[in-house]
Structures are given as C-alpha cells and as structure tokens.
Image (cartoon, helix red, strand yellow):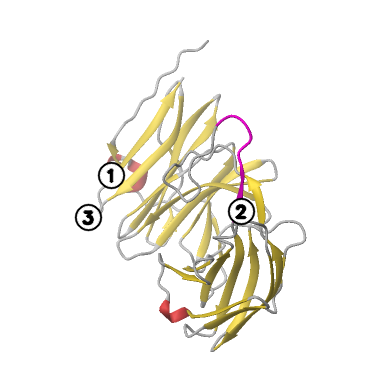
C-alpha cells in the first residue's frame, strides 16, 4: 500500500506570477439570457396529515401572471400544469436512518423497519409582472390566499391550521450548458456583490473549467481530466485554480480575470504527488490566499 499524507499550505496569491502578468488566454465565452424577473413561491402541503391525501384544484393569481408551475417531490401520476391546475397525492413512506433528533422528523432507528411518515410534497410557483402577486390556492376542501409582497426571503407562513406552509424563494438562474454534465461548483462574490461561479463541465469524454459572472459563461483553459475548482474574487480581479491530471499526477493550474480578460492558465504546483481540492479566499482589501490538499 502506498503511503499517503495531506499537506495544507497557505500562500499569498500575489506571489504567483500569473496573477499579475496580463496575458491573452485561449478562452471562449457566450452571453447568458437575461435573468428572469418575478417571484417564486414554494407551497408545501400535508404537514399535519397522518394519512395520504389527494390535493386537486387550481392556483389563481391576480396582479401578475403565472410564469411556470411544477411539482415539488412529485412522483408517478402527480401533475402540476402551466395553467395553474394541479392533481397530486401525498404519501406515507418509511424514512430510514434520519439521524437528526432535533428536526421535525426526529431520529429513526438504524435497524428494523422505520414507521411510515408523511412525505411532504407541494408546488413551485413562478410569477412575472411585478411583486404585487396575490395567490389563491383553491381546491374542493382547502382554500387559502396570500400576498407575495407580505413574504420575505427566509421566512414562511402557515395556513389551514398549520397543514400548509408557503415560502418565498429566489429566482434561480441556469448557468451551465444542458448538453454537458456539470459538477463541483465553487462560488465567490466581489465587494460589489457580483457573484462568480466556477465548475467542471464534462462533455465529449473530457472536462473543461467554466466560469460565470451571471451574464456570461467563460470556458477557461484546455480540456482534459480535471477536478473541482476553487475561486476567489476581489474588487478588480477574479482567480480560479483547478487540478489537472498531468503526467500521472494531478497538478494545480490557475488563471486570473483582470481588465475584462482571462490570463493564460499556468501550472502552480510541480510535486511528485497529487495536488487536489484547492481552496481560495480574498478579503475586502484585495488580499488573497490559497490552500490545497496533497497526497502521494
């Protein structure tokens, strides 16, 4: 068996030459569609039910329009339609090995047959046309209303004597190419609030590093056998590092985004063992640091 060790190093990124030298890199980019504007709500039902229950009816909105509606934890014949109609049934199922005694479901034993418990289900509703949405949940035996403007992120409202919960969710944005397998994301934010995301995209039997600021997606570096990237952002620069399989081991490579262009990727490590799982951080004064885990 080969010996293994882990090495954690903290080094100032300013000492790495490629972060301060402007070089045009071989990279590509494409614009993302504009971020959708509107509101999104999650409606969870059956919180107090002790038996499966069918929920059938319609979501009606005033002041806005329905942009999309889908099921949350749906299975089998459960349906939610773009016109606001829905038809689904909550289920009782055994939830095994729940090791959270303080949670709503508590702990279940590691052996034996856990007792069936209610599986929460519901609807994801997206609206557009402003923030004055008034939403009505209408079914033969359950009806309630809420105003979207009265909900804040991070809080929830209960209806029907606590059997229904409504939450306001942010509008998500798809960054990655649906034709690739995208994994291992890393996120950093600039002091101005711009969120940068880096990830590995697998397509055509190889990986590539992709980075986005929410308006564009950049493909950085060459394709190959790559691993989880790290990213850090300051006011003027964004730094990305990733492991690349190179001559039998993983070495770290990195690139910097400065003055609206990516630098040419450069190799950062030259060890006999594998360097993986990089970590990076930047403070509000533009100082950066990095760490890695190495083994052989």
Q: Do the CB atoms of the residues marked 1 and 3 lie less than 8 Å apart?
A: no
Query: Gap between marks 3 and 2, in whole Å?
Result: 47 Å
Q: Do the CB atoms of the residues marked 3 and 2 lie less than 8 Å apart?
A: no
Membership of 54 in magenta stretch: no
Query: Gap between marks 1 and 3, in whole Å?
Result: 13 Å
- Callout 2 environment at 10 Å: few (<14), some (14 to 19), or many (20+)? some
Q: Secondary structure at mark 3?
A: loop
Residue at image point 40% right, 66% down: 155
Q: Locate residue 113, reporting x and y percent.
A: 64, 35
* Disc 1 target residue: 14
Magenta segment, prevailing SS (helix, strand or loop): loop
Q: Do the CB atoms of the residues marked 1 and 2 lie less than 8 Å apart?
A: no
Q: Is residue 271 above or below residue 282?
A: above
Q: Secondary structure at mark 2?
A: strand
- Callout 3 environment at 10 Å: few (<14), some (14 to 19), or many (20+)? few
Residue at image point 53% right, 60% down: 217
Residue at image point 70% right, 79% down: 83
Q: Nearer the viewer, mark 1 or mark 3?
A: 3
Q: Which residues are magenta?
A: 110-119
Q: Secondary structure at mark 1?
A: helix
Membership of 116 in magenta stretch: yes
Of 62 and 90, nearer the camera is: 90
Q: Locate residue 146, reporting x and y percent.
A: 50, 80
Give the residue at the far left of this rendering.
Answer: 285
Of 45 and 12, nearer the camera is: 45
Q: Is residue 87 above or below residue 38?
A: above
Q: Nearer the viewer, mark 3 or mark 2?
A: 2
Q: Earlier in the sequence, mark 3 or mark 2?
A: 2
Of 140 and 197, nearer the camera is: 140
Query: Gap between marks 1 and 2, in whole Å?
Result: 51 Å
* Disc 2 target residue: 119
Q: Which mark is residue 285?
A: 3
């Amino acid at each position: 068996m080969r010996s293994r060790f882990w090495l954690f190093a903290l080094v100032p990124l300013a000492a790495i030459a490629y972060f301060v030298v402007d070089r045009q890199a071989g990279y590509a980019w494409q614009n993302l569609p504009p971020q959708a504007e509107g509101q999104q709500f999650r409606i969870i039902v059956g919180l107090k039910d002790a038996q499966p229950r069918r929920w059938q009816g319609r979501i009606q909105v005033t002041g806005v329009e329905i942009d999309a509606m889908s099921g949350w934890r749906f299975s089998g014949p459960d349906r939610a339609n773009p016109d606001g109609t829905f038809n689904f049934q909550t289920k009782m199922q055994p939830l095994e090995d729940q090791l959270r005694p303080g949670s709503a479901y508590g702990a279940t034993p590691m052996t034996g047959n856990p007792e069936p418990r209610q599986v929460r289900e519901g609807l994801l509703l997206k609206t557009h046309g402003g923030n004055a949405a008034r939403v009505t949940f209408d079914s033969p035996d359950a009806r309630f209303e809420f105003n979207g403007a009265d909900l804040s992120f991070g809080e929830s409202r209960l209806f029907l004597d606590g059997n229904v919960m409504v939450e306001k969710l942010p509008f998500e944005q798809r960054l990655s190419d649906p034709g690739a397998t995208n994994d291992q994301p890393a996120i950093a934010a600039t002091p101005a609030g711009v969120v940068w995301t880096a990830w590995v995209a697998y397509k055509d039997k190889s990986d590539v590093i992709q980075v986005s600021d929410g308006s564009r997606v950049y493909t950085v570096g060459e394709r190959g056998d790559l691993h989880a990237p790290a990213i850090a952002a300051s006011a003027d620069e964004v730094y990305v590092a990733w492991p690349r399989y190179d001559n039998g081991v993983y070495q770290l490579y990195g690139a910097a985004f400065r003055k609206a262009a990516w630098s040419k990727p450069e190799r950062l490590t030259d060890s006999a063992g594998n360097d993986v799982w990089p970590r990076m951080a930047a403070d509000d004064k533009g100082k950066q640091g990095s760490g890695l885990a190495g083994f052989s």
